[in-house]
Amino acid sequence: MSVTPVSSEILAINGGSPVRKTLLPYGRQTLDDDDIHAIVNVLRSGWLTTGPKVEEFEEAFAARVGAKYAVSFSSGTAALHGAAFAAGLKAGDEAITTPMTFCATANCALYQGARPVFADVCRDTLNLDPEQAITKITSKTRAILPVDYAGHPADLDAILQIAERNGLIVIEDACHALGAEYRGRLVGSIAHMTVFSFHPVKHLTTGEGGMVTTERPDLAKTLRRFRNHGIDSDARQRQTAGQWHYEMVLLGFNYRLTDIGCALGLSQMEKLESNLSRRREVADRYTEAFRYIPGVVPPSVRSDVLPAWHLYPIRLDLAHLCADRGQVFRALRAENIGVNVHYIPVHQHPFYRERFGYKGGEYPVAEDAYQHLISLPMFHGISDEDLADVIHAVIKTVGHFAK
Ligand SMILES: *Cc1c(COP(=O)(O)O)cnc(C)c1O
């Protein structure tokens, strides 16, 4: 794709005409007729929830990520809560995580009465820095929650080694990383528990939904109970066995994913490979286009991973620009490019500041990265024309603000 630099154009924010007439979102789902038929068929099947589609989806998912067990949940957040529970997190415990994530990663420790303890991120990937994580370990630490930021796997071997030495459980938040690979292994088969989300902006959607994968039968059993009120069997098992008796053995929730969601998930799984390759193609096109644009730093990729590209976060090199991130962001929005920012470091949210007394400055790498980040539109359904619009708008905007 060739895009001519157009820095002489008037920015839309200054009254020029925008690169696009309609807003291009940063992410969105793709649904085709197969997906719609799958939902119509399940509506006619007699099962709306806790029926055969749940198991079918869980089995197909486990097979895709190379895991022994997959347990579905009503959202990625519910799945994180389930994993925090199964890890045994409780009041007085600590869980080490990254500030460069969606707040749900840290919140799941709080749901269990445990304390999330942040450790700073690596400069290149913005993933949890294992060296920083080590410095946060205390006698109260029970779990580590790395996040595969933007779909680039965290340094899982280093984190698992730290966990093993200190008797900790690793819960990998892979909500960005379905289909990613780390040192030739599939994300979902590496950590003690791996959590996925099926929100519409993710790689496959069930409307709302989530999954935990694990190799351990004891964890899988606890996860299944936790998502169903802590009950030791589900309605379908009892119906099949012709039994009414059940026992509630722990305090759980109703975090079940419906058959409607699972039927959609199964149908979406058929498209996962092509979705992933489109996302990788989009990333390649962006990286190629921005390679020689001063002021734009494409996300870096380590040589031992294959990212899944949930996000494409560029970093602005402000030394080359006479504008800050906010100005570039607003200018791109005015061009109708639905840019976003991932993430406000979690400890900087008012809740965390008030509860834990963070003042800023605690996690300099994450805080500095936050000032420079802009997520460009990244989704599998993006057209080549949309992609050209984004590249055009970035070159136009950054060209305008070039020093
Ligand atoms: C999407 C996401 C979640 C939460 O998933 P939901 O399905 O929206 O509850 C958690 N962590 C990260 C990093 C996410 O991107």
Image (cartoon, grey):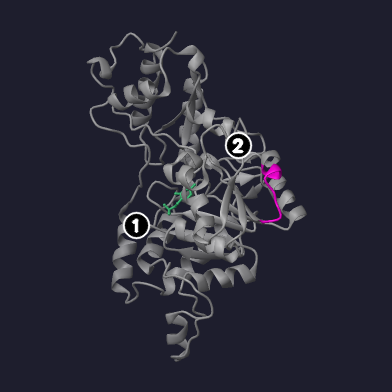
Q: Nearer the viewer, residue 240 or 139?
A: 139
Q: Which residue is the site of mark 2?
A: 121
Q: Amino acid at mark 1?
A: Asp
Q: First in sequence, mark 2 or 1: give its number.
A: 1
Residue range (magenta) = 133-140
Q: Quadrant of the N terminus?
A: top left
Q: Which residue is the site of mark 1?
A: 35
As measured in the structure, the alpha-carbon distance from the residue carrying label 2 to the one carrying label 1 is 38 Å
Q: Picture quarter containing residue 49?
A: bottom left
| Image location of residue 82, percent across then percent down | 52, 63
Q: Nearer the viewer, residue 333 or 393?
A: 333
Q: Residue at x 49, y 79 (%)?
A: 231
Q: Residue furthest right?
A: 165
Q: Tell me if residue 249 comes above or below residue 90 in the rendering.
A: below
Q: Residue at x 26, y 21 (%)?
A: 18
User: Is 351 situated left or right of 173 in this image?
Assistant: left
